[in-house]
Image: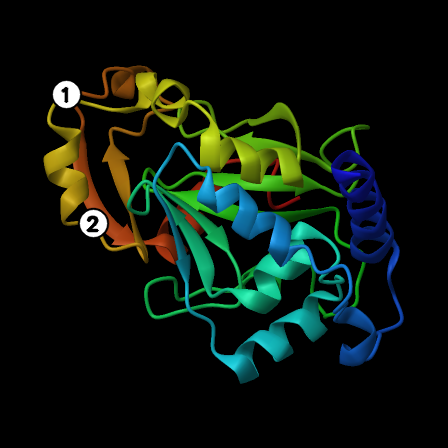
């Protein structure tokens, strides 16, 4: 039954997120009988990693759900409607919801002007999360590859979008239970914990020389600064092609 729910949710997500052009009413997006927030809460209870579900603002969450046009029957819609976002391991990974003081960006507003121009448009991909080193997780809507609905990582040391072979639900489960430290083992430096401790979840580290350059290959020796996540995004877009064209 659980697998059937996930399959239905994934199918529903794809049909709404990447084919939807006519805006549905909010009441049609809130599924009270099969709300995926129950699944998210179950995953949190058994999570191996530190998971913090941020409190939502009721008005903002309704607006965000309407703008993103995804049913709460899917994990993505449930996270947008029921949470201000989710922080993994004290905010090393930040999963977008409807926004919170600790996570000042929500899923639809953050993507507007980046992956689509107007709400209701079909996006080629969605930015669904970011991390402390200023990288982004993208959900493929067609312009990243043939694997529609799979998650990609916008790698900080190559400026390439790397396929993770994970659906959105798989990605959430990885964040809750996966080997996050192992995933980032080559992207952390000596005493990174001390530097990270003072980093806001609305900021990210930026490295100079840039990690994707020959001079920036040694992450221990590069200069590290804290800047807003928006500034990091703009910098990376200006330096590469895959995410902005």
Tag 2 or tag 1, which sits nearer the N-term? 2
Is residue 200 left or right of 130 when viewed as pictured? Answer: left
- Specify few, some or many for label 1: CA neighbours under 10 Å numbering under 14, 14-19, or 20 or more: some
- From the viewer's perspective, is the residue at label 1 or at label 2 nearer? 2
- Specify few, some or many for label 2: CA neighbours under 10 Å numbering under 14, 14-19, or 20 or more: some
Position of the C terminus, as image quadrant, is top right
Is residue 176 left or right of 123 when viewed as pictured? Answer: left
Residue linked to disc 1: 221
Q: Choose top left, top right, bottom left or bottom right for residue 185.
A: top left
Along the line of sight, the residue nearer the viewer: 117 or 19: 19
Instruction: Using the numbered discs, state the Cα–Cα distance from disc 1 to disc 2 in whole angstroms.
Output: 19 Å
Q: Residue at x 32, y 58 (%)?
A: 202
Residue 210 position, x and y percent, is 31, 29
Q: Residue at x 17, y 30 (%)?
A: 192
Is residue 113 left or right of 185 when viewed as pictured? Answer: right
Q: Residue at x 25, y 34 (%)?
A: 207
Residue 39 higher or lower than 84, as above or below: above
What label sits on residue 199 in the rendered view?
Answer: 2
> Is there any visible trace of residue 148 in the rendered image?
yes
């Amino acid at each position: 039954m659980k697998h059937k729910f996930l399959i239905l949710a994934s199918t529903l997500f794809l049909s709404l997120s990447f084919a939807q052009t006519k805006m549905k009413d909010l009441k049609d997006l809130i599924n009270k009988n099969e709300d995926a927030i129950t699944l998210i809460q179950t995953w949190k209870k058994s999570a191996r990693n530190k998971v913090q579900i941020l409190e939502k603002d009721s008005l903002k969450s309704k607006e965000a759900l309407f703008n993103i046009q995804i049913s709460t029957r899917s994990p993505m819609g449930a996270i947008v409607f029921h949470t201000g976002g989710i922080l993994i391991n004290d905010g090393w990974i930040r999963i977008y919801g409807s926004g919170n003081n600790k996570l000042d960006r929500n899923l639809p507003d953050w993507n507007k002007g980046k992956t689509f121009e107007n709400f209701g448009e079909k996006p080629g991909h969605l930015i669904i999360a970011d991390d402390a080193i200023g990288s982004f997780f993208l959900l493929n809507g067609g312009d990243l590859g043939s694997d529609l609905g799979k998650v990609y990582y916008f790698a900080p040391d190559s400026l390439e979008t790397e396929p993770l072979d994970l659906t959105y639900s798989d990605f959430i489960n990885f964040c809750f239970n996966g080997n996050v430290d192992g995933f980032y083992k080559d992207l952390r430096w000596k005493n990174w914990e001390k530097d990270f401790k003072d980093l806001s979840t609305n900021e990210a580290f930026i490295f100079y020389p840039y990690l994707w350059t020959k001079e920036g290959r040694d992450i221990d020796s590069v200069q590290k600064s804290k800047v807003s996540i928006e500034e990091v995004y703009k910098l990376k877009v200006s330096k590469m092609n895959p995410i902005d064209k």
